[in-house]
Image (cartoon, helix red, strand yellow):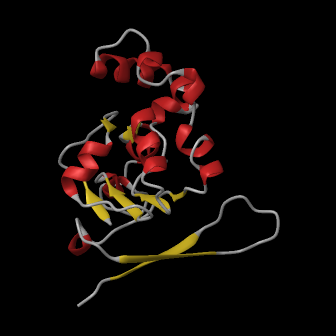
Amino acid sequence: MVADISDEVGDYDVYTSDMIEDAVDVREGDILFIHTGYQKYAWHREEADPHAFFCKHPGPNQEFADWCKEKNLNYLLLDCGSADHPMNTVVRDVRPELAREAREKHGVEDLDEIFPPEGYQLMHTELFPEGIIHVENAQVPEELLNERVQIGTFPWRFRGGESSVCRCVAFKEE
């Protein structure tokens, strides 16, 4: 499924399972592509803004990770720099001015209220052991938004690697 939530999210927003389910019908075992709209900031685009792409994109919290496990998703694809919210990664510590912006946007004193320390990088640490991996920096054509398609990812295999570039392909039924 390709879920377009780009009209609902912006810098530092937290997306939820409800947003995804309002956009598309996600079934158990699906491959889910989340279109946040941040692919427009990728390095090869006219509006390239690596700062927004990697440090300000929307992302999930614990509720979403739990939902992914309940749905037993096959894997996730995202059109931004990370499957994790940037404020649930090292970005929060190394860029305090961005953490301040995020706190102000969410109206909280401490980002731990949204992203408790025990859930640090939860899309990596909690989902990978469950067999739910993800593809970051993926691009999706607009004609596939909110469509059910077959998705294939073809990584470059190499000995000892833990991540890889890959080719992502969508097959749409006619």
The residue sitting at 57% across, 22% down in the picture is 117
In this view, 174 is above or below 109: below
In this view, 89 is above or below 133: above
The residue sitting at 61% across, 57% down in the picture is 131
Q: Is residue 162 left or right of residue 27?
A: right
Q: Is residue 11 left or right of residue 89?
A: left
Q: Is residue 174 left or right of residue 169?
A: left
Q: Nearer the viewer, residue 4 or 23?
A: 23
Q: Nearer the viewer, residue 78 or 133?
A: 133
Q: Quadrant of residue 40?
A: bottom left
The location of residue 91, given as percent across then percent down, is 53, 31
Quadrant placement of the C terminus? bottom left
The residue sitting at 24% across, 45% down in the picture is 19
Number of numbered tags placed on the structure image: 0
Q: Quadrant of residue 104?
A: top left
Q: Nearer the viewer, residue 25 or 101?
A: 25
The location of residue 54, given as percent across then percent down, is 46, 44
Quadrant placement of the N terminus? bottom left
Q: Is residue 6 visible?
A: no
The location of residue 53, given as percent across then percent down, is 41, 47
The location of residue 99, given as percent across then percent down, is 44, 22
The residue sitting at 35% across, 62% down in the picture is 27
In this view, 20 is above or below 122: below
Q: Is residue 133 visible?
A: yes
